Amino acid sequence: MSLGRHIRTCSVCHHEQREEIESAFIYWRSPAAIAEEYSLSDRASVYRHAHALGLFPKRQRNVRAALEHIIEKAGEVDVTASAVVAAVQAYAKINSAGEWIDRTESVSLNELFDRMSTNELEAYAQSGALPEWFQATVARA
Ligand SMILES: [Zn+2]
Protein backbone atom coordinates (compact mmCIF):
# COMPACT_ATOMS: atom_id res chain seq x y z
CA MET A 1 0.00 0.00 0.00
CA SER A 2 1.36 3.46 -0.87
CA LEU A 3 1.98 5.92 1.93
CA GLY A 4 -0.57 8.33 0.44
CA ARG A 5 -3.28 5.68 0.46
CA HIS A 6 -2.26 4.64 3.96
CA ILE A 7 -2.57 8.20 5.25
CA ARG A 8 -6.03 8.59 3.70
CA THR A 9 -7.37 5.47 5.38
CA CYS A 10 -5.43 5.40 8.67
CA SER A 11 -7.10 6.32 11.94
CA VAL A 12 -3.73 6.81 13.66
CA CYS A 13 -2.51 9.31 11.02
CA HIS A 14 -5.62 11.40 11.63
CA HIS A 15 -5.55 11.04 15.40
CA GLU A 16 -5.08 14.16 17.53
CA GLN A 17 -2.59 12.29 19.73
CA ARG A 18 -0.68 10.70 16.86
CA GLU A 19 2.73 11.58 18.33
CA GLU A 20 1.85 10.09 21.70
CA ILE A 21 0.63 6.91 20.01
CA GLU A 22 3.85 6.60 18.01
CA SER A 23 6.07 7.13 21.01
CA ALA A 24 4.06 4.61 23.06
CA PHE A 25 4.67 2.08 20.28
CA ILE A 26 8.38 2.85 20.08
CA TYR A 27 8.62 2.43 23.87
CA TRP A 28 7.22 -1.10 23.60
CA ARG A 29 3.74 -0.51 24.97
CA SER A 30 1.39 -3.25 23.92
CA PRO A 31 -0.44 -2.33 20.68
CA ALA A 32 -3.65 -3.74 22.17
CA ALA A 33 -3.29 -1.38 25.16
CA ILE A 34 -2.49 1.53 22.84
CA ALA A 35 -5.58 0.80 20.72
CA GLU A 36 -7.74 0.76 23.82
CA GLU A 37 -6.28 3.88 25.39
CA TYR A 38 -6.60 5.97 22.20
CA SER A 39 -9.94 4.53 21.09
CA LEU A 40 -8.58 2.98 17.90
CA SER A 41 -10.57 0.20 16.28
CA ASP A 42 -8.04 -2.53 17.10
CA ARG A 43 -4.35 -3.32 17.48
CA ALA A 44 -4.13 -4.12 13.75
CA SER A 45 -4.54 -0.40 13.00
CA VAL A 46 -1.56 0.30 15.28
CA TYR A 47 0.51 -2.36 13.49
CA ARG A 48 -0.53 -1.10 10.02
CA HIS A 49 0.46 2.44 10.93
CA ALA A 50 3.76 1.27 12.44
CA HIS A 51 4.61 -0.68 9.27
CA ALA A 52 3.66 2.19 6.95
CA LEU A 53 5.70 4.76 8.90
CA GLY A 54 8.72 2.54 9.56
CA LEU A 55 8.26 2.44 13.34
CA PHE A 56 9.27 -1.21 13.73
CA PRO A 57 13.00 -0.59 13.12
CA LYS A 58 12.86 2.40 15.47
CA ARG A 59 11.28 0.26 18.16
CA GLN A 60 13.81 -2.51 17.63
CA ARG A 61 16.66 -0.06 18.11
CA ASN A 62 15.07 1.04 21.35
CA VAL A 63 16.52 -1.91 23.20
CA ARG A 64 16.97 -0.16 26.52
CA ALA A 65 13.27 0.61 26.67
CA ALA A 66 12.53 -3.04 25.93
CA LEU A 67 14.80 -4.17 28.75
CA GLU A 68 13.30 -1.61 31.16
CA HIS A 69 9.95 -3.09 30.25
CA ILE A 70 11.10 -6.62 31.17
CA ILE A 71 12.60 -5.40 34.42
CA GLU A 72 9.46 -3.41 35.34
CA LYS A 73 7.19 -6.29 34.49
CA ALA A 74 9.14 -8.74 36.58
CA GLY A 75 6.69 -8.42 39.46
CA GLU A 76 3.55 -8.65 37.32
CA VAL A 77 4.06 -11.46 34.88
CA ASP A 78 5.65 -14.84 35.08
CA VAL A 79 9.11 -13.98 33.83
CA THR A 80 11.79 -16.39 34.92
CA ALA A 81 14.31 -15.06 37.39
CA SER A 82 17.17 -15.81 35.01
CA ALA A 83 15.50 -13.75 32.26
CA VAL A 84 15.23 -10.78 34.61
CA VAL A 85 18.83 -11.13 35.74
CA ALA A 86 19.93 -11.38 32.10
CA ALA A 87 17.89 -8.28 31.25
CA VAL A 88 19.39 -6.30 34.12
CA GLN A 89 22.90 -7.34 33.10
CA ALA A 90 22.19 -6.52 29.47
CA TYR A 91 20.69 -3.15 30.42
CA ALA A 92 23.85 -2.24 32.27
CA LYS A 93 25.92 -2.94 29.16
CA ILE A 94 23.87 -1.15 26.53
CA ASN A 95 24.34 2.52 25.78
CA SER A 96 21.51 4.84 24.83
CA ALA A 97 22.11 4.19 21.12
CA GLY A 98 21.29 0.53 21.71
CA GLU A 99 24.88 -0.60 21.28
CA TRP A 100 26.44 -3.23 23.44
CA ILE A 101 29.40 -1.56 25.13
CA ASP A 102 31.17 -4.50 26.75
CA ARG A 103 34.40 -4.75 24.77
CA THR A 104 34.58 -8.51 25.07
CA GLU A 105 30.98 -8.95 24.04
CA SER A 106 29.99 -10.17 20.61
CA VAL A 107 26.24 -10.50 21.10
CA SER A 108 24.22 -7.67 19.61
CA LEU A 109 20.81 -7.39 21.22
CA ASN A 110 19.65 -5.35 18.24
CA GLU A 111 20.41 -8.33 16.06
CA LEU A 112 18.47 -10.58 18.42
CA PHE A 113 15.45 -8.28 18.24
CA ASP A 114 15.81 -8.14 14.45
CA ARG A 115 15.77 -11.93 14.39
CA MET A 116 12.48 -12.11 16.31
CA SER A 117 9.47 -12.91 14.13
CA THR A 118 6.35 -10.72 14.18
CA ASN A 119 4.60 -13.33 16.31
CA GLU A 120 7.48 -13.37 18.77
CA LEU A 121 7.50 -9.57 18.95
CA GLU A 122 3.78 -9.54 19.52
CA ALA A 123 4.00 -12.17 22.26
CA TYR A 124 6.74 -10.09 23.82
CA ALA A 125 4.72 -6.86 23.57
CA GLN A 126 1.72 -8.50 25.21
CA SER A 127 3.21 -10.64 27.94
CA GLY A 128 6.88 -9.77 28.19
CA ALA A 129 7.70 -13.31 27.07
CA LEU A 130 10.94 -13.62 25.12
CA PRO A 131 11.56 -16.59 22.85
CA GLU A 132 13.64 -19.36 24.41
CA TRP A 133 16.46 -18.92 21.92
CA PHE A 134 16.70 -15.22 22.83
CA GLN A 135 17.03 -15.88 26.56
CA ALA A 136 19.53 -18.65 25.93
CA THR A 137 21.68 -16.31 23.82
CA VAL A 138 21.57 -13.48 26.37
CA ALA A 139 22.24 -15.85 29.27
CA ARG A 140 25.40 -17.14 27.56
CA ALA A 141 26.68 -13.57 27.16
ZN1 LIG B 1 -1.08 5.88 9.74
Image (spheres, rainbow, N blue to C red):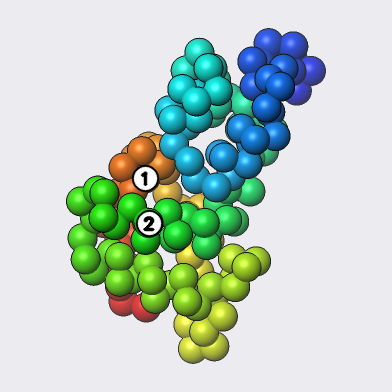
Residue depicted at x 29% and y 57%: 74
Q: Pick the quarter of the image with the C terminus.
A: bottom left
Front disc: 1 or 2: 2
Q: Nearer the viewer, residue 100 or 75?
A: 75
Residue 26: image quadrant is top right
The span from disc 1 to disc 2 (Cα, nearest Å) is: 14 Å
Residue depicted at x 74% and y 11%: 8
User: Helix, strand, or loop for circle 2?
Assistant: helix
Residue 32, above or below 90: above
Residue furthest right in the image: 4
Report x, y in % for residue 140: 31, 76
Report x, y in % for residue 33: 44, 30
Query: What residue did someone put label 1 on?
Result: 124
Q: Are marks 1 and 2 in contact (CB under 8 Å)?
A: no
Q: Nearer the viewer, residue 28 or 8?
A: 28
Residue depicted at x 65% and y 35%: 20
Does 85 sit left or right of 98 as displayed?
Answer: left
- In the image, what residue type sits under mark 1? Tyr
Query: What residue did someone put label 2 on?
Result: 72
Q: Is residue 121 visible?
A: yes
Residue depicted at x 42% and y 49%: 116
Residue 18: image quadrant is top right
User: Helix, strand, or loop for circle 1?
Assistant: helix
Numbered mark located on residue 56 in the image: none
Report x, y in % for residue 13: 71, 22
Q: Nearer the viewer, residue 85 or 47?
A: 85
- In the image, what residue type sits under mark 2? Glu
Choose the circle earlier in sequence order: 1 or 2. Answer: 2
Crowd around label 1: few <14 · some 14–19 · many ≥20 (10 Å): some
Q: Pick the quarter of the image with the N terminus.
A: top right
